[in-house]
Image (cartoon, grey):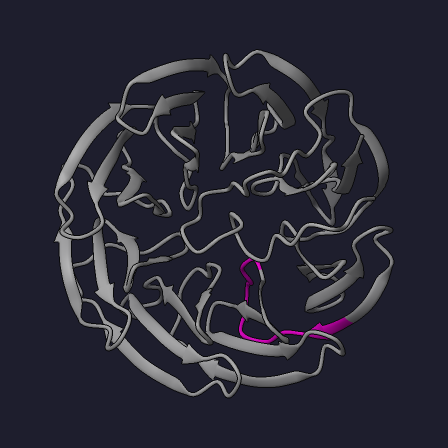
Amino acid sequence: MPTATDWTRFQADNGNTGHLSDVTAVPEDPEIYWDFYVSSSPPVVADRSLYTTEYREERSVVARNAATGELQWTTAVDGGGMGMPAVASDEVLVQSYTRLSGFDRQSGDKLWKRTIGQGPPGCPVVVDGVAYLANGAFNEWSTEVFAFDVSTGEQQWRTTLADDDSDLEGSVAVNDGYVFIVAGDIIAFNTTDGSEVWRTQLDSPAETTPTVSDGKVYVTDSEGTLHAVRTEDGSERWTADVGEPESGTAVAVADDEVYAGTKSRLSSLTTTGELRWEVDLTDALTPTVDTDAVYVGQSGFRNRAVYALARDDGSERWVHNTDEEQISDTVQAGVRGPPTLVEDGLYVVAADGMRAFGR
């Protein structure tokens, strides 16, 4: 499996764009290099190692050889359910329901852990040695936004939202001195002190993850309207109907194109809001994009495949079906989050395990 590319967090970068320029994954005729069953988050990749959070005998952060999938180390994580890991320099960060933990990237040794309230975990964003994250409200806790020093775990600031703000279901984005979250509204905070800078109220609350690119924040609300607003003040640039999204998902942005996966379709628009094409695709999740194709998984029981579609017209390049998996007394199915792209390869996690595709 090719391993030269680094894809270090959810959707690759600080803006959650799901795209790295000049990376071409597997736009045609994929070959499965390896696969095995594991209950896992989508992986991130750094320096030829692959990092996941996994449900083994206990909840763990796990490092594997990115070329072979061979286990390198595993370390238990406390604090409940876990989000996708983030790699920052020599550390791996994991957000769980009640904790943010830092681990040594080479050994897996736990460096520090901090309490962050209670709520569905996302994936931290690291900029200049500071980790930014938010924790959605759960069990009467308020939604909160945090900044921590990555090397020491020292809290830089903590901002608590009002009790009437909606729960947060996704991750944050960071760009040009702002931390962006979606908690019903789209809200921007100052990265220096956590103060709220602006807020855009939506007609329908949103429970998705913001994507930031070229001065715009993209968010899809619960009624299926995609909003593009200015990063500097939250003023609206345009809206488009793309269909109702799954909670926590994000659109992808590549060059001058926006890709939105929803419960009914995958849509491609320009960054000025004009529809380029759309494909009927039930239960579509967060897409990722390379130089030639857009990749997206389906989360349902009947619809549980991963697709590669041409960027120019949405035509199908290839499709790979995944299977149901019996776990104890329950049956699970569907793809788990966005595909992870590397040059000449991609990783997909579904209910029936992890696969490494190559060409």
Q: Residue at x 78, y 20 (%)?
A: 29
**Does the image show residue 335?**
yes
Whole-percent x, y for residue 20 in the image: 55, 43
Type of secondary structure dominating the magenta stretch: loop
Q: Which residues are magenta?
A: 74-84
Q: Quadrant of residue 339?
A: top right
Whole-percent x, y for residue 132 in the image: 39, 69
User: Which sits in the foreground, 304 or 315?
Assistant: 315
Left or right relative to 26: residue 256: left
Whole-percent x, y for residue 244 in the image: 35, 29
Left or right relative to 64: residue 104: left
Q: Quadrant of the C terminus?
A: top right
83 drawn magenta: yes
Q: Quadrant of the N terminus?
A: top right
User: Which sits in the foreground, 328 or 7?
Assistant: 7
Whole-percent x, y for residue 237 in the image: 17, 34
Q: Is residue 123 above or below residue 30?
A: below
26 drawn magenta: no
Q: Is residue 243 above or below residue 127?
A: above
Q: Quadrant of residue 17?
A: top left
Q: Residue at x 22, y 58 (%)?
A: 188
**Does the image show residue 162?**
no
